[in-house]
Image (cartoon, grey):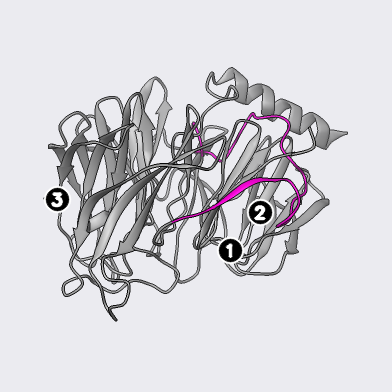
Amino acid sequence: MRNCFAVLAAGLAFLSCGALLAGDWPQFRGPEGSGHSSEVGLPLTWSDTENIAWRVELPGSGWSSPVVVDGRVYLTTAVPVDPMAEKSDLSLRALCVDSKSGALLWNTEEFLEDAETAPGIHQKNSHASPTPIVEGNSLYVHFGHEGTACLDLEGNVLWRNTELRYPPVHGNGGSPTIWRELLIFSCDGGEAPFVAALNKQTGELVWRHERGVPAEKTFSFCTPQVIEVNGREQVVIPGSNVVSGLDPQTGAVIWFANYDGYSVIPRPVYAHGMIYISTGYNSPVVMAIRPDGAGDVTETHVAWKHDKAGPNTPSLLVVGDELYMVSDNGVASCLDAVTGTQHWQKRLGGNYSASPLFAEGRIYFQDEQGQTTVIAPGTSYQQLAKNSLTGRTLASYAVAEQAIFLRSDTALYRIEATNR
């Protein structure tokens, strides 16, 4: 009964925040970047032959997650210019797919990556990993060190920015976020890591925040999260050895907390007056930090830490009073979000990169081998279903139109209850 009330309370709290009405999924992890959806009628089970409305092959390769706005799905991809060459130049492209039919509506190039100068990437990464973001009539696509572009929703390029060069390690990864007139993203490469804000109308650099924190390995791949604390907005962005709350208008530091970690990937989550992060490699520590301080808050505003089975790659998920996570090697955990006390831990099996989803009163964990484990939220583990698709699945979910959109290494799926 307590679990039922917790889920109900989470849903009511979510609606009271004013954002999550059923509709679009415009950015990485949904409308508020938290992995929540208020869509109803989603399927509990599926397979290659069950509850698949359509499956469409995608050109090239990429691990950017799909976003869905007004009946269209947007993704990015990297297509070899010469598929027969051992090492080809890559056409970095944006794709638009009709969400109802799966038809490819347009496919346009934004950048060309030179094979001779292209750096190597991690075996789990791609040359098109950051997730696009849609606002109004604009689509923003980001390819890390290769550049950032704005398109209209018919695929016409409005501006490009290729000025923010930096030496990447393992490729690109972090997705951008929007604050008012700014497009904000991390540029945490092999040296001199920084955070950048572009004018979203022109692509011009507005501010640049130099990390300036000593770290043996400076590269990270985190997506910023914009929050409001005591009436003041801030953009929270973890990197190697530090998480910072920045003034989104200027990039000035409001607060920061130090830790030991690099290659930080999980997007921060904000709930219960705390920001939740995972500190990356080599041994991730999940931290809850009160973001109402100033300056160095390492010793004063860290509410709790948890150092067992934390995620290197999947983001965290808060539902009601509980925090859920899955480690890269498939160990799921549920913690009390306020105190950090562990309620349960369960080995799901498989390896994980995609971030978990809360929708239809359920939690969905997608592994890298096409298998989704669905559980009920609560302080005891209750599995509801296990679903399998063919292919590798490292991208995170998008949810819209009573359907789940899932990208594999070769295809895009629309998963819905087809017997309605």
Q: Which label was assigned to residue 162?
A: 3
Dot 2 falls on a residue whose secondary structure is strand
Residue 78: percent from left, percent from top? 33, 60
On the rendered structure, is 13 left or right of 104? right
Amino acid on which the number 2 mark rests in the picture: Phe
Label 3 and label 2: CA atoms lie apart by: 36 Å
Q: Is residue 34 magenta?
A: yes
Look at 60% across and 24% down and name the residue there.
Answer: 22
- Say if mark 1 contacts mark 2, CB within 8 Å: yes
Q: In terms of depth relative to the viewer, which is nearer, 274 or 183?
A: 183
Give percent across and percent down for residue 221: 36, 57
Residue occupied by mark 1: 352
Q: Nearer the viewer, residue 15 or 251?
A: 15
Mark 1 closeness class: few <14, some 14–19, many ≥20 residues within 10 Å: many
Between circles 3 and 1, the one closer to the viewer is 3
Mark closest to the chain's N terminus, 3 or 2: 3
Quadrant of image for the C terminus: top right
What residue is disc 2 on? 365
Neighbourhood count class around disc 2 (C-alpha, 10 Å): few under 14, some 14–19, many 20 upward: many
Magenta region, mostly helix, strand or loop?
loop
Real-space Cα separation, disc 3 to disc 1, in angstroms? 32 Å
Q: State yes or no: residue 357 in magenta.
A: no
Identify the image quadrant of residue 365. Answer: bottom right
N-terminal of the two: label 1 or label 2?
Answer: 1
Q: x and y percent of residue 89 in the render?
A: 22, 68
Going from N to C along the chain, the mark reached first, 3 or 1, is 3
Of the two numbered discs 3 and 2 in the rendering, the one whose residue sits closer to the viewer: 3
Q: Residue at x 60, y 68 (%)?
A: 351
Q: Identify which amino acid the numbered label 3 is placed on.
A: Thr
